[in-house]
Amino acid sequence: MALKNGLDFNNNGNSINLVVAPANKYLKINIDILSGLMNKDLKLIYLTTNKSCEVISSTLEKNKIKFNDILFIETKEHGISGKPHCLFVQSPEALTDMSIAICQTFQVFNKNKFLFFDTLSSLFVYNDPKVVVRFANFLVHKMRQHHVRGAFICIKKEIDEKVISQLSQVFDNVVEIGENGGAK
């Protein structure tokens, strides 16, 4: 399935994409990707590093985006919600706990799994860039083992070009979104 902005999730059913977006297009890009994935019989695993499950759920509802099967993994330092289908990791710097939670969700769904990682760039605030690149490499390897497709969102201004270059070696497809919202 090819989506707007040059994203392609076919690649033998197992494409893992890095989407580098400008900060001013971040929400629109997320909405475009998720609305393009809707009605594809996907089991969505939504990892959020900077918003609560409630905020994400509300945004999805407001934009009429609905998935039959969705699990959230929330990584934030404050509060715990009562939202069903939401796992919590204590903070974005707890990468081991995050990887365990993600891999556990791979076991929940049998097929058609899709990981939406919102946003990988937030991890750079809490972790050394080399550690985040190794974490991404580990996670992409696990996704391939479990036949999980995905999209990892990065905010361009929050990551330097060297790190983007290192990350691009890990992913099947790298789509850089321009200021106008289209793929470069």
Image (cartoon, rainbow, N blue to C red):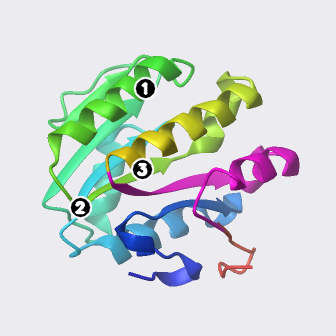
Q: Which residue: 15% across, 50% down? A: 110
Q: Is residue 159 magenta?
A: yes
Q: In the rendered view of the protein, which quadrant contains the C terminus?
A: bottom right
Indicate left or right for 100 with 87 as reference: right
Separation of residues labelled 1 and 3 (CA atoms): 17 Å
- Residue 51's place in the image compared with 67, above or below, is above
> What x and y, as percent, mark residue 103?
33, 33
Q: Which residue: 74% across, 74% down? A: 178
Q: Which residue: 37% across, 67% down? A: 34
Indicate left or right for 158 with 113 as reference: right
**Residue for badge 3:** 144
**Residue for badge 1:** 98
Separation of residues labelled 2 and 3 (CA atoms): 13 Å
Q: Which residue: 25% across, 37% down? A: 105
- Residue 146's place in the image compared with 33, above or below, is above
Mark 1 / mark 3, whichever is N-terminal: 1
Q: Sort mark 1 into few (<14), some (14-19) or many (20+) by Cα contacts within 10 Å.
A: many
Q: Amino acid at mark 2?
A: Asn
**Residue for badge 2:** 112
- Residue 66's place in the image compared with 45, above or below, is below
Separation of residues labelled 2 and 1 (CA atoms): 21 Å
Task: Determine whether the residue tagged by mark 1 lies in a helix, strand or loop.
Answer: helix
The answer to which image quadrant residue 86 occupies is: top left
The answer to which image quadrant residue 85 occupies is: top left
Q: Amino acid at mark 1?
A: Met
State which region is magenta: 147-174
Q: Sort mark 2 into few (<14), some (14-19) or many (20+) by Cα contacts within 10 Å.
A: some
Q: Is residue 95 visible?
A: yes
Q: In the rendered view of the protein, which quadrant contains the N terminus?
A: bottom left
